Image: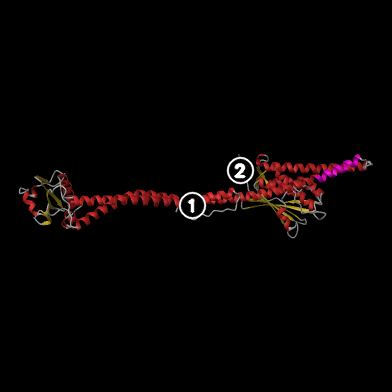
Amino acid sequence: MTIRRRLLISHLVMFAAPVLMLLITLCTAVAGLFIFIQSGNHVYIESSDQYSRAEELLYHAVFHGKTDEAEIEDASGYRWLVQVLDPEQNYVLLRRADGTTVLQYGNSGLRSLFPNLPDPGTLREMEHPDKGVYARVENNEYCTLRKRTVGGTPYSLLFISHQAPHGTDDRLEHVSRGTLIFLGLALLAFIGFTSWFLADFMIRRILPPLRQLREGAERVEQGDLTVRLQHEGNDEFTPVFHAFNTMAGVLGESLCQRAEDEERRKAWIASLSHDIRTPLTAIRAYVEGLMDGVADSGEKRDRYLQIILRRTGELDAMIDQLSLLSKIDMGEKAVPLERIDLNEFLEAAAADSREAFRRKGLDICWEGGPPCHIEANRLLLERVLMNLFTNSAKYKDRSRGELRLIVAAENGRVILTAADDGPGVPEEALPHLFEMFYRTDKARSRTGDGSGLGLAIAARAMELMHGSIRAENGVPRGLVIRLDWPAAEATDETD
C-alpha cells in the first residue's frame, strides 16, 4: 500500500472517528436508559421545562416520519419511550377521531384534574407550534392536547403530568453521572487507541525504509559499493530504492572504470615512452655518427640524414595523433559535426588515396551504395578511413592486397564495411584492437611501422560521431571492420 493511500485512509479515519464516537455515545445512552427502565425505574418530571421537553419528544416520537395509519397504530415503535415516564405521575392517551384508543398509559385519574378539556375535533391542524395545541397548567399539573392528521385520519395525543417533588430523579441523575464518566473514559481510550493506531499505521511504513536507506548510505560512505537495498511492496519508496541501487551500481562501475583507466594510463605512459624513445634513440645514434665522422662519405651522410628525417616524421605523426586524440576528448566543441553524404565522401576519399596505396601494394575497391547521410566530422571521418587504409597496407602478407568498401542501410542505421584479404588477427586480440598502443606483435618488433594509435583514434572518433566500430575476422581470411552510424534525418533541399 502506498504512503499516499495510507494518508488518505488516516484522514478518512480521523473524519469517521467523531461520527463513530457519537454513535457509541448514543448507543450507550439508549442502552443505559433501556437497562434503567428494565430495572423498574422511571423518569420523573420536576419542572415545567422538563415537561415541555418531554412533551415535545413524545409528540415527535409518535408522529414524526409517519405517513399512514398502520405506522401510527403500531405503537411498538414508541411505546418504550412512553414507558420511560412514571405511570403514577403521568398519563398518555393516543386515539383516533372516532374514539378508538391506540395507546393509553399511566394514571388515568389525572384526567379529572382537567375537566374542561376541549374536544380534539375543535382544534386546528398543527401547522406551527402554536396551532392545533391546547395547553393548561393547574397548580403542579401540566396538560397538553394536540391534533395531527396522518394518512387522512385525525389523531389526538393527550399528555398530562403531575409535577414530582424535587430530588425524585436522584437515582437517574446518579446513573447519568456514572454513564457520562464511563462515556468520557471510553472516548478518551478510543481517541488514544485511534491516535496510536494511525501513528503506527503511518510510521511503520516510513521509518523502516528510511532507516534502511540511512544504513545503505553509511555503507556507501565506508566504500562498500556492493550494497543493494531490498524493499517490499510498491509505494513511494520503490523508485527511491531503485535509484539508490542504480547509483551504487553506477558508482561501483565508475570506480572499476577509474581503476581500469588508471591501469590503462600507466600502460599508455609506458607505451608512449617506449614509442617515443625508439625514434629518439635512432636519431641520437645517427646524429652522433655524423658528429663522430662515422659517415665518411657523402652517400653515407645522405643516408643518415634521410633516416633522421624519417624518424622525425614518425615523431611528428605520433604527436599529430595525440593532438587529434585530445581534440576528440574535448568533444563536439573541438570537432563539430555536420550532415555528410557518405557515398560522395567515400568516392572522393578512395579517388584521392587509390594511387598512393596502389604503390604500397593495396588496391582500394569501392562501389556506390544507396543514398546514405550521417552526422560526422570530415576531418575525423577522413582520419578513420586513412587509418583503415594504412592498417590494411601495413599488415598484408602478399605482394598485393585488396580492401573492399561496402555501404548499406539497415533499420535506420548506416553501415560501412571495410574488408581486406590480409592474414587477419588472432581471435583473442579482436577485443583489444581499439586500445591505445595495442599491437598484435607482443614483442613490439615492428614499432617503426606505426604508433599503435590508429584504431584507438578510430574508435574514439566513431563514439564522438554517435557511431560504433567493431572488428571480426573474415572468411576465409582477412580482417573486417564495420562502422555503424544512425542515419541522419532528411533536410528540405529546396530551402
What's the residue at 43%, 50% (across, down)? 202
The percent coordinates of residue 485 (x first, y second) are: 65, 49
For the residues labelled 1 and 2, say whether their Cβ atoms are less than 8 Å apart: no
Relative horizontal placement of residue 382, taking residue 31 as reference (left or right)? right
In the rendered image, which quarter is residue 425 located in? bottom right
Query: Residue 94: x, y in percent?
Result: 12, 54
Instruction: Identify the residue at the far left of this view.
Output: 115
Residue 432 covered by magenta stretch = no
- Quadrant location of the C terminus? top right
Dot 1: within a 10 Å radius of its alpha carbon, few (fewer than 14), some, or many (20 or more) residues?
few
Q: Mark 2 points at which residue?
A: 491
At label 1, which amino acid type do we have? Answer: Pro
Q: What element carries label 1?
A: helix
Q: Where is residue 441 in the image (x, y as percent from the top left)?
A: 78, 54
Residue 312 left/right relative to 241: right
Residues drawn in magenta = 277-291
Quickly name the residue at label 1.
208
Q: Which of 198 and 45 is in front in this view?
A: 45
Q: Quadrant of the N terminus?
A: bottom left
Of residues 34 and 170, the one drawn nearer to the viewer in this rendering: 170
Q: Residue at x 36, y 49 (%)?
A: 14
Which x, y percent locates residue 298?
93, 41
Q: In this rendering, does residue 18 appear at all?
A: yes
| Mark 1 to mark 2 CA distance (whole Å) | 56 Å
User: Which circle, 1 or 2, is nearer the viewer?
Assistant: 1
Query: Which residue type does callout 2 highlight?
Result: Thr
Residue closest to the far bottom: 476
